[in-house]
Image (spheres, helix red, strand yellow):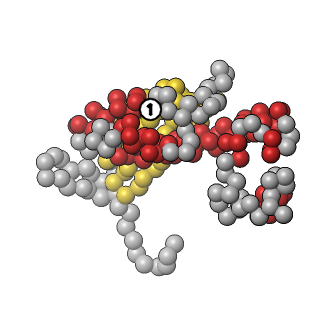
Amino acid sequence: MFGDSERELTHTRQITCRAFRRKDGLWEIEATVVDEKGEDVPFRSREPVRAGEFMHHMGINFLIDENFTILDVRAAMQATPWTGCGEAVDAYRRLIGLQIGPGFGRLIRERIGSEHGCAHLTDLITQVGNTYTQASWPDRVARQVAIDPDPRRWPDSRALAFVGECRVWKRDGDTLRQEYPELAQQ
């Protein structure tokens, strides 16, 4: 990618997030992180992780309602570098009742705390929130359009929370003028 220099694969991290719409109107978001080593990793107090083995293989699943509220959380660890890592999974149950939205990351840290959770699972939760938002967006917009076709009068402003949050969706940009001309700055 950066030229002809020889290189050696030493680590592969795969993050996978999948969203499922349930027949009861709830959403299930499954997120996993897998770290596969491309070389042996020595430790002082345990056997090494060998090339081709997983350093981490863990996941977290959320059950979320249409109002961004977390109804249930389940964490699991299939592969970890330390036997004590699995003790962190129950801490994520403390997220039940939280609402995904502004301040979500801060609230996660307050409820879990650094020493009660797992850095990898906690980092993965940001992707859970993004996945839920992406997956549920068409449903949220459809509900708002059914109420009123003019987005300026939509009761749930979260359907358009991305406006003004990136270059393409800037308030005076072409994308906003084309998709939501009512919201574009003239």
Q: Position of residue 182 (x, y in %)?
A: 84, 52
Q: Residue at x 77, y 64 (%)?
A: 172
Residue 179 vs 125, above or below: the answer is below
Q: Position of residue 153 (x, y in %)?
A: 81, 41
For this orientation, the residue located farthest to the bottom is: 4
Q: How many tags in the picture?
A: 1
Q: Quadrant of the C terminus?
A: bottom right
- Mark 1 Cα-neighbour bin, 10 Å: few <14, some 14–19, many ≥20: many
Q: Residue at x 77, y 33 (%)?
A: 143
Residue 16 vs 75, above or below: the answer is below
Q: Position of residue 19 (x, y in %)?
A: 59, 36
Front residue (pair 61, 4): 61
Q: Residue at x 74, y 36 (%)?
A: 155
Residue on which the image places disc 1? 95
Q: Quadrant of residue 121?
A: top left
For this orientation, the residue located farthest to the top is: 24
Q: Is residue 144 left or right of residue 114?
A: right
Q: Quadrant of residue 69?
A: top right
Q: Residue at x 24, y 55 (%)?
A: 41
Q: Is residue 39 left or right of residue 17?
A: left
Q: Position of residue 35 (x, y in %)?
A: 38, 50
Residue 17 appearing in the image:
no
Residue 8 appearing in the image:
yes
Tell me the element at label 1: helix
Q: Quadrant of residue 85?
A: top left
Q: Is residue 91 left or right of residue 60?
A: left
Disc 1 marks a residue whose amino acid type is Leu
